[in-house]
Image (spheres, rainbow, N blue to C red):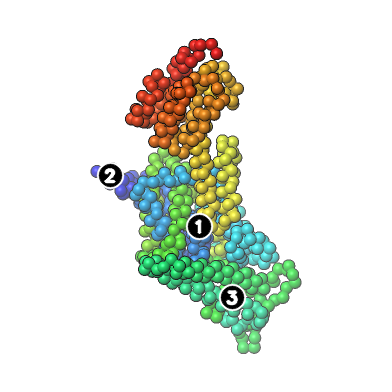
């Protein structure tokens, strides 16, 4: 009874808990929490969300993942890969950081949770095998590169180019490096150095927390953030003012079109339910598509306009009334902005945000996430479904890889189907408390493993630390520079890049390595839509598997000097007999490859004209289906009138069972079925090679 309860409530395995284990879990929980808080905020920015949603994702999902997950040391919560994939999935439908964007991010988490739960309930955890190791390595390498370089704009304190392409975004930023904010770069570089030095020389210290604390203290001390919000009319330069006004108007148009698109998708769903004629439905789809293209164009146009405005520094000039106006500071081409110059950040309700310093985390709501059902828009559910499936698959793969890697040291048994339930509940219940998509974190789980966490209680303790942070400590995070968070993300992802597995795969099976490389290139090309890259890799892998099944390896065998059997072509040996040949067929005999089996037999007959016996060494045939049985029957009946007997040796039990059930063994004859290849070879020589050749 206890064992059955533990299957449904895995956390019951934590008890009874000794005092020693409790102390270790407490230490592990606090240690992980010191990394979790800054990491979760950094990953939220990567997902296009306010930093507080990273903290929300570090609450309920962490607790639920620990209570219902299978592996004790797995820490569930916001992770870098899914954060970027979430942003890529939502970006076509809403402006980053907007209310609609946040709602869709939470809806996506709900969908991912449902998909994982369905997979867990139906026990299809083996779906992880759809992605080969080289393809996964190629995807992770490309995704790590994309994620790391996507932080370059925070590192430089620049607006997002938003061109729609990864390479064009990076090249645009690099072409404007003269506009980079030097203090922001200094914060980023210092963060990387602190984390590298501590990881190398003081690995027990929470390097992420130390770097975040250092950055926050220095930022507050030097007044790193310098922001003013004058009315648009205070911008004295007419050209700059007009561009800002156009930026504001275009943003309003994007919001209007986005709201219209949501309404039109709802109307389309209702029209489908009302059996509207197909021609009208197609017209509605075309209208929605045109609108989506228009929104995408306006977004890119406004992103370019924002970069253009940002490139023009402004200087503050006091007027006679004690207020200030801002005029353009015309700099020579290629010259850096002077100290004290202001750059455009955003505009809202006629108030322009100008900054002379760097971007910081800013004010974080000092409260806990409330229970709230995600807004269900079925049109958006359908639109996000492909991305949700890929995110669920990648998230589960990530959690499984983390668990298996750490379980190799603890010898705990990993049950993928139970982990599906844990990860599914973490996303599902997390979405009810305003969390975006989550998965198992390698870095935080590795910390827990290094400290020696005994149960999932350590994760619950880390979530309690986040709860305390949300209630009491958020004001102290105000001055944390975004460049510091960008550096934290960079350090996390660049460590994931590995080349050696692809080199090793090349030595084993070149096609696998090639598919890994293609996945890498495709993921970069499709960025930020990362899912397309790994889907292509999965399709190529499945196609190759299908091709290998359709064209299995088959060879006429002979005997080497050491007595072993080998293909006569590759090993340069003679066939086993003068009047009979032995063929090894290395695959199950199914409808996919019966044509290849027939071609092999006919090719052997054409190549060896005088043979009277054909022995099929069937040790590699694990199963046979109806098409395979029918093809064997047909070949036996075709060859016998030609004076050629077909024989089988080493039949596996399922194949022998199929032969008996269908009567194929009677058609072959008992004298043509042998328990092993050696007996078959001896008897075939006696039957067919007694007469002189």
> Would you identify the image quadrant in which residue 635 lies?
top left
532 displayed left or right of 666: right
Q: Nearer the viewer, residue 350 or 384?
A: 384
Label 2, on which residue? 4
Among numbered discs 1 and 3, the one appearing first in the sequence: 1
Label 3, on which residue? 247
Among numbered discs 1 and 2, the one appearing first in the sequence: 2
Residue 542, x across and y down, in percent: 50, 44
Q: Secondary structure at mark 2?
A: helix
Q: Quadrant of the C terminus?
A: top right
For label 2, count other residues whose C-alpha is less than 10 Å away and answer few (under 14), some (14-19) or many (20+).
Answer: few
Residue furthest to the right: 332
Residue furthest to the bottom: 321
Whether residue 286 is visible here, answered yes or no, is: yes
Residue 669, x across and y down, in percent: 38, 22
For label 1, count other residues whose C-alpha is less than 10 Å away and answer few (under 14), some (14-19) or many (20+).
Answer: many
Q: Secondary structure at mark 1?
A: helix
């Amino acid at each position: 009874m206890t064992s059955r309860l533990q299957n449904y409530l895995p956390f019951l395995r934590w008890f009874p808990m000794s005092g020693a284990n409790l102390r270790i879990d407490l230490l592990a929980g606090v240690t992980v929490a010191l990394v979790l808080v800054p990491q979760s905020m950094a990953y939220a920015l990567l997902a296009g969300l306010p930093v507080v949603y990273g903290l929300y994702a570090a609450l309920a999902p962490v607790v639920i993942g620990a209570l219902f997950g299978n592996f004790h040391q797995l820490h569930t919560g916001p992770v870098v890969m899914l954060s970027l994939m979430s942003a890529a999935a939502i970006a076509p439908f809403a402006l980053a950081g907007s209310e609609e964007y946040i709602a869709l991010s939470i809806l996506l988490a709900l969908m991912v949770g449902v998909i994982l739960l369905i997979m867990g309930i139906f026990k299809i955890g083996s779906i992880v095998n759809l992605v080969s190791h080289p393809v996964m390595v190629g995807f992770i390498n490309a995704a790590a590169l994309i994620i790391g370089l996507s932080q370059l704009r925070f590192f430089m304190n620049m607006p997002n180019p938003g061109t729609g392409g990864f390479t064009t975004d990076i090249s645009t930023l690099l072409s404007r490096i003269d506009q980079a904010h030097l203090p922001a770069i200094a914060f980023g570089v210092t963060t990387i150095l602190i984390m590298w030095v501590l990881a190398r020389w003081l690995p027990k210290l929470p390097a992420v927390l130390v770097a975040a604390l250092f950055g926050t203290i220095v930022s507050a001390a030097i007044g790193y953030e310098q922001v003013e919000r004058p009315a648009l009319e205070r911008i004295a330069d007419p050209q700059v003012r007009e561009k800002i006004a156009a930026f504001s108007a275009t943003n309003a148009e994007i919001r209007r079109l986005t709201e219209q698109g949501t309404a039109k998708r709802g109307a389309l769903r209702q029209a489908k339910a009302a059996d509207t004629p197909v021609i009208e439905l197609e017209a509605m789809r075309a209208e929605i598509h045109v609108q989506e293209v228009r929104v995408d164009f306006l977004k890119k146009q406004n992103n370019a306009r924002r970069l253009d405005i940002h490139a023009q520094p402004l200087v503050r000039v006091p007027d006679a009334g004690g207020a200030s106006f801002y005029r353009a500071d015309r700099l020579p081409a290629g010259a850096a902005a002077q100290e004290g110059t202001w750059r455009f950040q955003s505009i809202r309700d006629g108030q322009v945000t100008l900054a002379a310093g760097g971007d910081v985390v800013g004010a974080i709501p000092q409260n806990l996430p409330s229970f709230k059902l995600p807004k269900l828009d079925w049109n958006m559910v359908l639109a996000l479904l492909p991305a949700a499936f890929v995110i669920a698959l990648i998230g589960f793969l990530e959690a499984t890889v983390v668990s298996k890697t750490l379980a190799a040291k603890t010898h705990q048994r990993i049950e993928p189907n139970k982990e599906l339930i844990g990860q599914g509940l973490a996303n599902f219940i997390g979405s009810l408390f305003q969390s975006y998509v989550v998965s198992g974190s390698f870095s935080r789980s590795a910390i827990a493993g290094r400290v020696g966490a005994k149960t999932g209680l350590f994760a619950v303790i880390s979530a309690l630390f986040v709860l305390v942070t949300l209630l009491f400590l958020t004001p102290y995070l105000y001055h944390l520079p975004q460049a510091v968070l960008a550096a934290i993300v960079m350090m996390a992802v660049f460590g994931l890049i590995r080349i050696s597995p692809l080199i090793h795969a090349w030595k084993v099976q070149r096609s696998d390595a090639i598919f890994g490389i293609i996945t890498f290139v495709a993921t970069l090309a499709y960025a930020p839509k990362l899912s397309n890259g790994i889907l292509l890799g999965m399709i190529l892998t499945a196609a190759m598997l299908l091709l290998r099944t359709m064209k299995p390896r088959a060879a006429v065998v002979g005997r080497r000097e050491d007595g072993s059997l080998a293909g006569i072509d590759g090993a340069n040996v003679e066939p086993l007999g003068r009047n009979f040949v032995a063929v090894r067929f290395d695959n199950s005999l199914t409808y996919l490859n019966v044509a290849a089996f027939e071609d092999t037999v006919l090719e052997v007959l054409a190549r060896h004209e005088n043979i009277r016996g054909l022995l099929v060494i069937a040790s590699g045939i694990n199963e046979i289906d109806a098409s395979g049985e029918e093809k064997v029957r047909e070949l036996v009946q075709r060859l016998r009138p030609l004076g050629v007997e077909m024989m089988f040796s080493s039949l596996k039990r399922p194949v022998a069972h199929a032969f008996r059930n269908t009567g194929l063994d009677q058609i072959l004859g008992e004298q043509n079925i042998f328990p092993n290849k050696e007996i078959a070879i001896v008897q075939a020589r006696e039957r067919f090679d007694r007469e002189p050749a």
